[in-house]
Amino acid sequence: MLLDVKDVSLSLKREGKYSKILDQVSFHVNNGETVGIVGESGCGKSMTALSLMRLLPDKAKLDGEIRLEDELISSYSNRKMQKIRGNQASMIFQDPLTSLNPLHTVGKQIEESLLLHTSLSKQERRKRVIKLLNDVGLPRADELIDEYPHQLSGGMRQRIMIAMAMACEPKLLICDEPTTALDVTVQAQILELMNELKERTRMGIIMITHDLGVVAEVCDRVIVMYAGKVVETAPVEELFENPKHPYTKGLMQSIPKLGIRKQMLGSIAGTVPSPENMPAGCRFADRCSQAMDVCKTNVPQMTQVKKNHKTACWLYENKGVKKDAAAGSEQPKTAFYL
Amino acid sequence: MDALRYVFKRILLMIPILIGISILTFFISNTIPGDPARLILGPKATPDGIEELREEMGLNDPLYVQYGRYVNGIFHGDLGESTYSQQPVIDDLERYFPATLELTLFAMLITVLIGIPFGVISASKKDKLPDQFTRVFALLGVAMPAFWLGLLFLLLFYLKLGILPGSGRLDNGVSPPDMITGMYTVDALLTGNMVAFKSALIHLILPGITQAAVTIGMITRMTRSSMLEVLQSDYIRTAQAKGGSENRVLYGHALRNGIMPVITLLGMTFGHALGGSVLVESVFSWPGLGKYAVNAITYLDFPAVMGVTLLIALLFITVNLIIDTMYHLIDPRLKYN
Ligand SMILES: Nc1ncnc2c1ncn2[C@@H]1O[C@H](COP(=O)(O)OP(=O)(O)OP(=O)(O)O)[C@@H](O)[C@H]1O
Ligand SMILES: [Mg+2]
């Protein structure tokens, strides 16, 4: 197991009060595996990623255990974490223009990781940077190295970000919506590149996105988050064919399908509860048409419903696969705008 | 190459600006009431005597003739003769300006060395103890009048403790170093005159700190707010995600992005300070341009007023050019045009 995240909770201070942003998040990532994290805006995807890298806002309270290659990095000091960041674990962000320093050349920015984590000489670093640029599919690398981010297109900039993240051959690559800011064709190219790099290096990838198309394209396994909690996890085909949690079913409904006329992008009725007033029971209960009494008062635990497929929902708790939900093709009765 | 062309073009542009300023000051100072000839001759002057002197000074010629004469003089290094000091204005400027320049540069050096790090620390430790400390420090600097702070320093370090000199540019008995730039510390270093260097340097300390107090406060606050904005940027998070240390992120990534408004403010205060700070110069008997300018105005010493105004204008434009050029050096997104 490359990355093991166990019961990670995060509280952030806002307007003088702490509120719980992540609640007992657990998951793992294997070598050579791409794990997607999906969920609505604000459900804590980015905060999960930043917790792994320990790049949290001031006064954040982080609990739980994070292991990277069996090292308990959640106990590391900040100084020790600096040696991990950009080295064993790197991260790519959403907006490739604002994520690159506008005043430094592309070469300098990629080289910085090498400077920080390796003892390569200046010439060796330059050679490596050029190789990295070639690896991420950028032409005329020896000119590019001296150019500035504003001289490049969005797709090129994201490739630069990837080259930067790949500089020290990380074991784990965390991508926070790496393609959201790009147009569709470029998006496809970037995803293809990431698949290719994964095949070559056998690194583990965490792919954060709210685009299920991206999930289908690159992920092996998916984690569905809702309001700071993991509600379902399953291999990608299984999740698409056989979603269990009413929230996941809602997400699947929201994928526009080709060939079906008049279908509009669905969205789930209601809003996500804010961290300040989380319901006592299941956090999705208020929006769930299958909610039962127990849902309002008790928190459901992650339950195995199939091999490698777990969900946290009272419909399945302690019963394995529930009777009336057993037929996965059945239409969920959750209220959707269709 | 682009940079050189840009600077050259900007220097050419300075010419019309300077001409405009010279015309403006020349006509203003010649149309305000007050007769220099009468002032020179004093209260016992006869009307005939005044008329004779006016004729001699060319004050009866049409203004444009007088202006033409003045501009012609400039090209020969002649700014007229001060009616107060009875010396060529150019000689007066040569004597007083280096003193002001030296003091200003020293004060700016203190400002940059303290103000910028304070601002950076303040931003990186927002709302924590170091931030509160620099906030109070900056506020005190800005709020205390320079002359009062100067007097306080004099009282403490000169009168009470007796560890620092309180007036002039050199100790009694130390002769000035050979004139190269007119700035004693620089000239003393260039000529290897360590006695003069030491004396000149300790004389700079009190007036330098006094003058720097206000600007340190402003620069600290400006650096802080600019850095706070930059520290929110995505590329700062990227730099952290690469494993850079806190200082590397602050000074290697954030500061360069946040420094522009600070440089602008520095340039502006520098330009102002070059005109001489009358208050600081008075408190520390510093023979600088500020006192010279005030005297010139008080005694309707037109040639001196003109000379000072032109010099300050020239300096302001030059500082501006330097700032703009630095902008372009710092930010590759700006194009030279
Ligand atoms: N600096 C902060 N201080 C306090 N709360 C924060 C801070 N940043 C984010 N949050 C809160 O943390 C929660 C999770 O945010 P997060 O950015 O992880 O969501 P996300 O799933 O990545 O959403 P998106 O899809 O919009 O990127 C949100 O409720 C947000 O309001
Ligand atoms: Mg996010």
Image: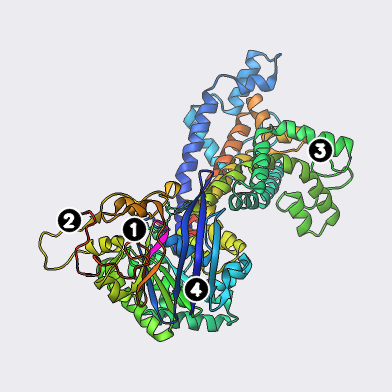
Ligand 1 within 8 A of label 2's CB?
Answer: no
Ligand 1 within 8 A of label 3's CB?
Answer: no
Q: Are marks 3 and 2 in contact (CB under 8 Å)?
A: no
Name the chain under label 4: A
Q: Which residue is mark 4?
A: A4
Discs 3, 2: same chain = no
In the displayed structure, does residue A257 sit left or right of residue B291? left
Q: CA distance from mark 3 to mark 1?
A: 70 Å
Residue at (44%, 81%) from the top-left corner? Answer: A31
Q: Secondary structure at mark 2?
A: loop
Q: Which residue is mark 1?
A: A40
Name the chain under label 1: A
Closer to the eye: label 4 or 3:
4
- Amino acid type, label 1: Glu
Q: CA distance from mark 4 to mark 2?
A: 38 Å
Q: Secondary structure at mark 1?
A: loop
Q: CA distance from mark 4 to mark 3?
A: 70 Å
Ligand 1 within 8 A of label 1's CB?
Answer: yes
Q: Secondary structure at mark 3?
A: loop
Closer to the eye: label 4 or 1:
4
Q: Which residue is mark 3?
A: B167
Q: CA distance from mark 3 to mark 2?
A: 84 Å
Residue at (54%, 58%) from the top-left corner? Answer: B254
Q: Are marks 4 and 2 in contact (CB under 8 Å)?
A: no
Q: Can residue A229 be found in the magenta stretch? A: yes
- Amino acid type, label 3: Ser
